[in-house]
Image (cartoon, coloured by chain):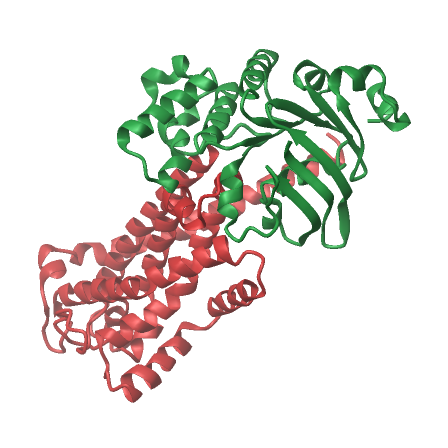
Amino acid sequence: MNKRAIADKLLIGFFWVSGLLILLVLVAIISYLIWRGGPFISREFILGDPAGIPLGSEGGIYPAIKGTLWLVLLALVLSVIPGILTAIYLSEYGCSGGLAEIINLLVQSMTGVPSIVIGLFVYALGVVTLGWGISLLAGGTALAIMVYPVIVISSRDALQGVDENYRLIANSLGVSKSYTLYRVILPRAAAGIIAGILLSLGYAAGATAPILVTAAAVIANSSGALFEPVMALPYHLYILFNEHLSMNYAYATALVLVILLLIINILALWLNSLQERINGR
Amino acid sequence: MNAVELINFSAGYGRKDVLRTVNIGFKSNAISAIVGPSGCGKTTLLRSINRTAELERGYNCHGDIRIFAQSVMDVKNVSNVRRQVGMVYQTPVALPLSTKENVLFGPRYYGGKSNAEMDAIVEDCLHRVALWDEVKDRLNQSASQLSGGQKQRLAIARALAVEPQVLLLDEPCSSLDPASTGLIEELLKELAVGLCVIIVTHNLFQARRIADETVFMMDGQMIEKGLTSKLFISPSDEKTRSFFSGLVG
């Protein structure tokens, strides 16, 4: 075997080990959570309210699940349409303009803003200045600001992945951009756009920092009222762990959160592979 | 009268000149072929005629292009020009719609027709490109299942559906097999009755087989234009002779 072939084999071995390592870490985390938290997951834990003294050491996490879903829903309501519209502008209308380049740069920079900074910004503006208080509205807004650039980038990439020939054909028939967008480009990019939205949904559901100072409460009934605080899974987990309320329940809560995120991510991955198959057709 | 006329027309991208003071006329009811080495400006010329070249970054042009004596350069609504001047590209591409909706992509946008009229357009256009018999039973199925040759004929049908007066084709047969090429050449001859057909081709035999007139271009300039039968046998310019004899490619 010559040197090049040995280097090749070594490199392939290295890739394998790296891949395996990531898989091992994931399996280890989930197994550990199942081992520590699994026995405490019951119908009462999922569907019950927190109870016991101190509060949270018994009972369930239903308001936290509900609160997380409310937060994510509100974040999506606030970010999906502006995100997709920005992506459409970047991909279809502003491709050669300076404004598009500036927006691209801004969106890219937004992904680098630490989520706690976004939380503090919404705290100063929404919670204090606008008088929203610690509330679902403030938390949803913070999460929306956090996921907006993710939605823009994934939607823009999905739109740009659509065969350029379709635009060429449409242009040479004299039809408008919006007609082409509506009839060809958007349907063609839909799976990729939805996959991006799902990924950002998972990102929002697992985020703790932005809701820490804007929305989360140790105990709340998470009714969905905009100006009331909510419980949320990641924050509840943080409290259970940090205040030593119940380590068993902390692991069980973590397991529920991870399973929720896994389901969302698997759905997103499936949609992404569907989009790749559509593009290849 | 010429259907399409370029008058002192120059175009380029950024600082790069692609077409230099071109003066050519293309007749109606005829097929004109444009031949010349790669990069001589053939595609830019076609795309300038239906004003899609200006969608490219840095495109600039001056001079005039007239279609049936009307200048297209100052037309505000470019949609009208593009509708009047259909274009078929090199790669056979079907829009991700059914065969029927591919044909109706333009007509549905322009509207003003009943469902029965739309159906008639589909049948008529597919007949004109000799595709009707092959697809009439699967009009509502995805056009992506069609073969390359069928897709290219569908592309011509799609262009015809908005009733253009000029049809531009940019190397439409370069990725097709000889049988599909033959079929398209035959139907172009039929389409030329009532249309001005301009085809860019790298295949000199194709130009000889179907074109009434041939234009030879090089370095962004029109070198020579004439009846195909005459130009191929006795070109008057030395460059044309070299190109046709294979000395320059």
Residue A187 visible to the viewer: no
Can residue A201 be seen here? yes
Residue under the image location 73 percent in, 29 percent down = A1
The quadrant in which residue A82 appears is: bottom left
Q: Nearer the viewer, residue A221 or A59?
A: A221
Q: Foreground residue, B132 or B139?
A: B132
- The N terminus of chain B lies in quadrant: top right
Q: Quadrant of residue B167?
A: top right
Q: Position of residue A39 (x, y in %)?
A: 18, 55
Q: Residue furthest bottom?
A: A129
* Front residue of B77 and A258: B77
Residue with the most extreme front position: B1
Q: Position of residue A43 (x, y in %)?
A: 10, 55
* Up/down of A18 relative to B231, above or below: below
Tell me the residue at 32%/26% (across/down). B119
Rendered location of residue A146, percent (x, y): 38, 68
Chain displayed in green: B
**Which residue of the protein is positioned furthest toward the right in this rendering?**
B238
Rendering coords of residue A72 (x, y %): 27, 63
Q: Residue at x 81, y 38 (%)?
A: B219
- In this view, A30 is above or below B70: below
Number of residue marks? 0
With A99 as the anchor, is A64 left or right in this view?
left
Task: Establish if B155 lies above or below B45.
Answer: above
Is A246 left, or right, of A20 in this rendering? Answer: left
Q: In the figure, what tint was chain A given?
A: red
A252 displayed left or right of A155: left
User: Viewed as shown, does residue B117 lie left or right of A176?
Assistant: left
**Quarter placement of the C terminus of chain B:** top right
